[in-house]
Amino acid sequence: MASGNAPNGGTPDALVRELRASVRGEVAFDATARALTTMDASNYRRVPLGVVTPCDADDVAATLAACRAHGVPVVPRGGGTSIAGQATGTGVVLDLTRHLRSIVELDPASRTAVVQPGVVLDDLRAAAAPHGLTFGPDPSTHSRCTIGGMIGNNSCGSHSVAWGTTADNVHALTVARYGGDTLRLERGAEGPAGLRELVAGHLALLRTGFPGLPRRISGYALDALLPENGPDPARAFCGSEGTLGVVTEATLRLVEAPAARALAVLGYADESAAAEAAPGLLPFHPLTVEGMAADLVREPAGLPRGAAWLFAETGGATPAEARAHAERLVRAASADAVDAAVVTDPAGQRALWRIREDAAGTATRMPDSSEAWPGWEDCAVPPARLGPYLRDFRALLTEHGLRGTPYGHFGDGCIHVRIDFDLLTGPGVARFRRFSEDLASLVVAHGGSLSGEHGDGQARAELLPRMYGDELVALFGRFKDLWDPDGGMNPGILTRPARLDENLRFEVLPKKPVDVEFGYPHDGGDFSAAVRRCVGVAKCRTEQASRPSVMCPSFRATGEEAHSTRGRARLLHEMLAGEAGGVITDGWRSTEVRDALDLCLSCKGCRSDCPVGVDMATYKAEFLNHHYRGRLRPAAHYAMGWLPRWLRLASPFAGALNALARVRPLAALAGRVSGIAPERGIPVLARERFTRWLNRRWGKGTFILSGDRTATLWPDTFTEHLSPEVGRSAVRVLEATGRQVLPAGRGLCCGLTYVSTGQLTRARTVMRRTLERLGGMLGTPVIVLEPSCAATLRTDLPELLPDDPRAAELAASVRTLAEYLEEYASDWEPPRLDRQVTGQTHCHQHAVLGDAADRRLRERAGLSGELTGGCCGLAGNFGFERGHWEVSVACAEDQLLPAVRQAPPGTEILADGFSCRTQLAQLGGVRARHLAEVLAEGLDAGAPPQAPRSSGAGAA
């Protein structure tokens, strides 16, 4: 195969037949599989022919042999978080994450582990932890990156000052080559034929051509093949970016994990001062020396004074020893630091590290919300040169009219940065090239490496001659040819590379904004810009959600890339590309996008948990609106989407309808007609609506608006018709504070169910009618008891009606019950309940509203214990729709149901959302309650007398 590039005009049927006959794993050449793998976390995009998901090493060998026979290149892919473009390609993508993820052996005595390439780093660390061991390299994507990908990129992470790079921690590799044969690589092994002769003929060049610095990742590590270094072909293979072969098994070195850790956080006057101080901390043997400047930190988050900070983690056998180590380090740094803090609390350390770990996504948005991109994400210089280099780097940015926010591994001289390149226009791309060439020269002038962690890929390989010279780069090509004489392994990467300004992923997107319904205020009203938010760091692919995170429940349920936030964003990207080169060419009518979005729960978890704020719930509503425009919708969209209307019509007949719902054949028939899953029970209608009860209690039309002592209580559909007991309890609590409670009026609707089913024209009509009916009550604090309705009013309302100032006014007035009590009744003391709680923070509350006020209210009431994160899985209409039952149950089993089962007897089960309470009742057989109900019960059991209400002849 002369060029290493297979034609991309269509599916090679003969190859597909051979692969399906010889591979036990999945062989997928459909549009969805190809669209999901066009990009990694870089600026680049290449469209593959198909994807193979091998079950074992034999499948890998069979795939490589078949592809060689048909002249089709192969791209090994792990978590797809590479940021230089090396995990994209035009041939067959080998997805190693689904099946090849076994920890074959873990030997605490020898401190080694034998693993397959698809093992996620955190899984390996969890397996090693009971033995007091860990795998040293720990990139910020540790919750989803794979060992195979780390070997391919020679990943490092924040602890490299203590434990080195991946190459430093690899003992041996089993590697399958293009064509199907296998090599065992370890110190002293031969490698492919001709390798020893290649090295022997160029000893002087290999001994003098590589800069000596801790983070030299660029190019091939041919110096590892020198006689005095082993030779060590396994080490030379690390960082080869899938261009030599495919790792099928790796033997790794484990290191002792400190029993206790402390974090010294040092504040400096500026970034250069922090960079110049970093090398002085290394003699104290810290585990990390990380740095960042104030322009990356949106909120101080407890950081000490300063405009830049160093994070130096220390370890010890005991907490006291770790703290003492950190305090010694702080004393040594006191001459240069303007402030310092030592953090020993694990939660406090996690909060600070979260700022650092999310930086790859956070830095993608500048403070003014403009976009920034990788491309020069991780170059490295000798640590002693870092201060001068950063000054020159900032000056170069200014010279080119660019902005960036450097941060990273200051102790190793490695800097991460996202830069506000214009990659959408010809002049912008030309400036990207000029800057790249100038920066490469600057890095080399400081004795550095173009890549200090993530590899060269397409972003930097073209510029390697500036670092190594033509002779050594030519030797790289000969090394590649010994391994891969047919040029089939990841062509265009490292050797004979594509140009750094080719294959940019943005060039296929529409040049003008597409016509959409939502306002997308944070993306300039441009849906394409909203979709571009996804940079591919894949935090949504984390399989074990840490509290209180939510994203992405459907991926955790299925394990399918198409059901991750990133996967859905990739499909939308290809849909927008359309005829300009996209894999998906039928636009809003795409069945591929529809099917991927079908299992999106619209939990909005990505809106808060995604480092760049992708909002897939909004994108889903937008897509469904266009997809079904002028066409018949699924029955559930009419049944569940129009739920507020049906419940209003059914309310007078609640008793009779409840009785009919208990007749199983009738209930089953109603479920089939309405598209409801047969496994679901139909909720019971309230015999008395909440607003009717409230009008009886207060007397219709007898309210006086009395300033800050007036609370407008929103009669959301669920409280009004299905759980009025929640509203009655809230009224009881509010009365106890001396506040007057006004019903906002019957028939008001936030539009939630219309939005979640993508009926946006109808949603807008409902919202406008609601604003009209509120009239003079706009501006009064509005207490919304159902979190999903509160989130809709706070976000979807102003984004669907961006030109109506009343929408923004209402959105700003929305309060949860806890927020209202804290803001308007701060002197009120809740009843002391002193009991344990469990349950769930509603996913919309987590993502949009926040739960800090609720936490403080629970603490004041003596309700101790943590609520789970995740999503209950019912998620409004989602869990009721036919075909969603299994995923709905799996989501509930992720965090919520286990937490409830493990709770001791007498624990109070809290769930403010109607969906959460329904899911717990139907799947767990337990009755959960809204926080208002628990507080009201406490009041009734021994509360102070009810505060008198004002009376008079006003109208609500």
Image: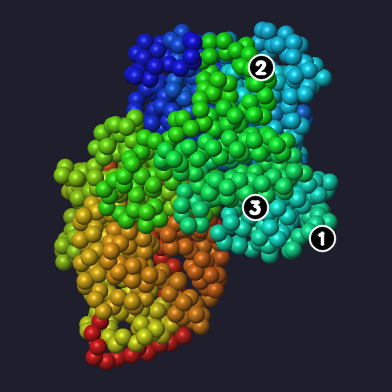
Element under disc 3: strand
Q: Which residue is mark 1?
A: 335
Q: As shown in the figure, which amino acid type bears the numbered disc 3?
A: Met
Q: Residue 33: x percent and y percent?
A: 39, 28
For marks 2 and 1, the one nearer the N-term is: 1
The residue type indicated by label 1 comes to: Ala
The residue at 68%/35% (across/down) is 444
Q: Say which element carries label 1.
A: loop
Q: Is residue 10 visible?
A: yes
Find residue 712 and report its image quarter.
Answer: bottom left
Kindly identify which residue carries mark 3: 292
Specify the amino acid type for callout 2: Leu
**Residue situated in front as seen by the camera: 814 or 383:** 383
Which SS class for mark 2? helix
Q: Is residue 824 above or below residue 43?
A: below
Residue 692: image tag:
none
Q: On screen, 702 above or below 893? A: below
Q: Position of residue 68 (x, y in %)?
A: 48, 11
Using the image as rendered, state which of residue 635 and residue 385 is in the foreground: 385
Residue at the spot x=49%, y=44% of the render?
Answer: 421
- The colour scheme of the drawn protein is rainbow
The residue labelled by disc 2 is 475
Place of residue 108 in the rendered image (x, y in percent of width and height, measured from the top left): 74, 32
User: Between tags 2 and 1, which lies in front?
Assistant: 2
Q: Residue at x 68, y 65 (%)?
A: 305
